[in-house]
Amino acid sequence: MRFTRVLGAALLALGCAAGPAAADSSPSPSASDGGAGPTRAGTSFRTATEIEQDQRATASASAGDYLYWSFAADAEQRPTVRATVKLPDAHTAQTWQVDVYDGLRRRQACQYGAQTRTAAQGTASIDLTCVLRTVRAWSEPWADDPLPGTYYVRLTAIGLPAADLGLPVSTSVEVGAVNIGGGAAVDGSLAEPLVPGIAVTSEQKDEDSSRKSAVLSSIEPDGGWSSGWWSSRWVWTGVGGILAALAGIGGYALTRGTGRPTRVPPGA
């Protein structure tokens, strides 16, 4: 009996010692391992929280606050912004809206999606979607086309009743993009993407190429910004030219015949 008690105490001590070691050895979640994204949101364009594409950002706020996030979109991409607002149990009818602004802080219209929705009284959550137009590598100065650079997401409640001001809400935002390809390519490209601080950085690089300066916005698409002049449209243009040349040669070979017609007399 005594030996059994001693053995049990030894095993218990060994288990308690091994427990913390096993917990400490477990990896912590990170963005590269598919962990959670940012857990806060900015309150203005300058303090917008940066998020990557396909990353889910969350934030706790009060009804009536303006929440801002920012992400990067490159040429030939069609971004999609999805936002979810979890409302408290007791609230009146609320209308929420998600807006997207480009690097020049111009409001971009949604191509389709429920940009504004109203949650009836007692509704637990509300989902908003905004699918932007395809980002163009270059545009006319008078046009309002989306251009490569930083984009800002603003989420807020509009026309909020006074009784609901300050109620706690939970929000989540996720941005995805579809690469349209050469079908959306245009001739020309911007000298620099519309990223905050890019003009100051370019000026300092011109003065001293060895001097490095941090850009205010550090986010950019995977693989960096595209050069703008190359697209799959060049490949299809070359393939189309080769096929047209082969079709011309084949048509000439079929229609030219074998030489002098057989029904014509030799002396004719």
Image (cartoon, grey):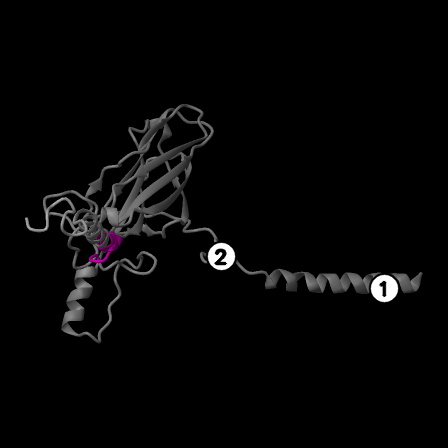
According to the picture, the residue beneath numbered tag 2 turns out to be 33
Give the side of residue 228 with respect to residue 221, left or right.
left
Marks 2 and 1 sit apart, C-alpha to C-alpha, by 41 Å
Residue at the spot 51% in from the left edge and 56% down from the top edge: 29
Query: Residue 252 appears at what percent x and percent y?
Result: 17, 50
Asked if the residue under mark 1 is in contact with the one under mark 2, i.e. CB atoms within 8 Å, the reply is no
The amino acid marked with disc number 1 is: Leu
Q: Nearer the viewer, mark 2 or mark 1?
A: 2
Q: Is residue 85 above or below residue 227?
A: above
Residue at the spot 20% in from the left edge and 58% down from the top edge: 229
Q: Chief secondary structure of the magenta span?
A: helix
Q: Quadrant of residue 15?
A: bottom right
The amino acid marked with disc number 2 is: Asp
The answer to whether residue 12 shows anywhere in this view is yes
Circle 1 Cα neighbour tier, 10 Å, few/some/many (<14 / 14–19 / ≥20): few
Q: Is residue 98 above or below residue 234?
A: above
Q: Is residue 84 above or below residue 235?
A: above
First-in-chain label (2 vs 1): 1
According to the picture, the residue beneath numbered tag 1 turns out to be 7
Q: Which residues are magenta?
A: 228-239
Q: At numbered mark 2, what does the secondary structure look like: helix, strand or loop? A: loop
- Work out which residue is located at the far left of the displayed protein and give it: 268
Find out whether residue 229 is within the magenta segment.
Answer: yes
Circle 2 Cα neighbour tier, 10 Å, few/some/many (<14 / 14–19 / ≥20): few
